[in-house]
Image (cartoon, rainbow, N blue to C red):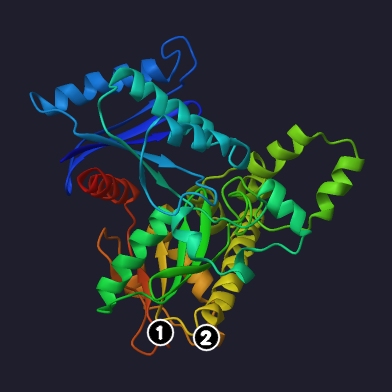
Amino acid sequence: MIILVINSGSSSLKYQVRDGDDVLAEGLVERIGEAEVPDHAAALDRVDHEVAEALGDRGIDAVGHRVVHGGERFSEPVLIDNEITRAIERLNPLAPLHNPAAVTGIRAITQKWPDLPQVAVFDTAFHRTLPEYAWRYALPDELYRTHGIRRYGFHGTSHAYVARGAAELLGVDAFTGVIAHLGNGASVTAVRDGESVDTSMGLTPLEGLVMGSRSGDLDPSILLFLLREGYTEKELNELLNRNSGLKGLTGTNDMRSVSEAAESGDKRAQTAIDIASYRLAKYVGGYHVAVGGAQALVFTAGIGENDDNFRSSVVGKLGALGLELDAERNAERSRRARVISTAASAFPVLVVPTDEEAAIAEATAGVVNGS
């Protein structure tokens, strides 16, 4: 089955065409909304042209969409129809930077290819197994019942994919441990017997770790203070989501640039790495407890897979857990799943590459075949 995987952003559209494990085409259309690409329909015209060149006389069988927020309704991938599209749209207030773009992409494809099956794959779905004591905020119950204010978690498609990969590497039926998905957006998840039992992101992807441009955890009173100082809601949103994290600490959200600066003696860059690695190490320690003793700590995504110095900085703060990296294994660059800890480490430290597009394509094929 040939699957077109779509990840729609507000001004970009990333796509990949897969036939099982084979990637037949992939690309990124940027600057949607400007003169050359006025809307998502125009972006899909460009994708259609590029895909047609790659496929020749073959055609797409189905489309899988990455949808960031599925709220409490969606706990698994679903076949899209008009009612599902409207339901996703009603979740826009919970993910105003992401869900509207997904809905736009869904409607653009519906208009262009009305008979093509489409499947929504939700970032939040893997975390629907969180127990109430993990997803509840200590706020009045009315806020949850009226506004849905609770912890949802994100990056679930990646965490689920990596949990399966870690189980395979360890030779166990279901993974129990801690997975750190570290990219420009970053989250860490506690997985017990293959299910998510806690995760660092909350109502939105802002909570948790220090990220490329997001602040992660902070004292909520800071926002009240800044409101009194004259900041607007829009300015606070921009501050916390786009101008904080590594960018706020160093001026750039690119971990590669931060690492290079730190290696050349830049104290601000080194402080940023110390802050980010310390925050993650605290979560790992807590989630080791949450799962009742981890089988492994897993690093994944861009930074997690490629930045051996950051991995070393994190694990170096976890001596109390008895973790120990093998320097040579940690420095290895590879796209394969592997162990990077020593034999003396209390439990293994792994690098397991993620592939969200493969996971979305697999889920899409499963839903379409099942329907």
Residue 271 position in % (x across, y down): 65, 60
Residue 30 or 255: which is nearer the viewer? 30
Q: Name the residue type under label 1.
A: Phe
Disc 1, disc 2: CB below 8 Å?
yes
Instruction: Find disc 2 in the rendering and name its residue.
Output: 321
| Quarter location, residue 25 | top left
- Tell me the residue at 24%/50% (across/down): 366
Q: Is residue 175 visible?
A: yes
- Quadrant where the image shows the C terminus: top left
The residue closer to the viewer here, 264 or 308, is 308
Q: Earlier in the sequence, mark 1 or mark 2?
A: 2
Mark 2 surroundings: few (<14), some (14-19) or many (≥20) residues within 10 A = some
Alpha carbons under labels 1 and 2: distance apart: 9 Å
**Amino acid type of the residue that numbered disc 2 sits on in the rendered structure:** Leu
Q: Is residue 9 visible?
A: no
Asked whether 286 or 152 is in front, the reply is 152
Indicate left or right for 211 with 137 as reference: left
Rendered location of residue 165, percent (x, y): 29, 66
| Residue occupying the far left of the picture | 57
Q: Residues within 10 Å of mark 1 (few under 14, many from 20)?
A: some
Residue bearing mark 1: 347
Using the image, determine if residue 185 lies above or below residue 351.
above
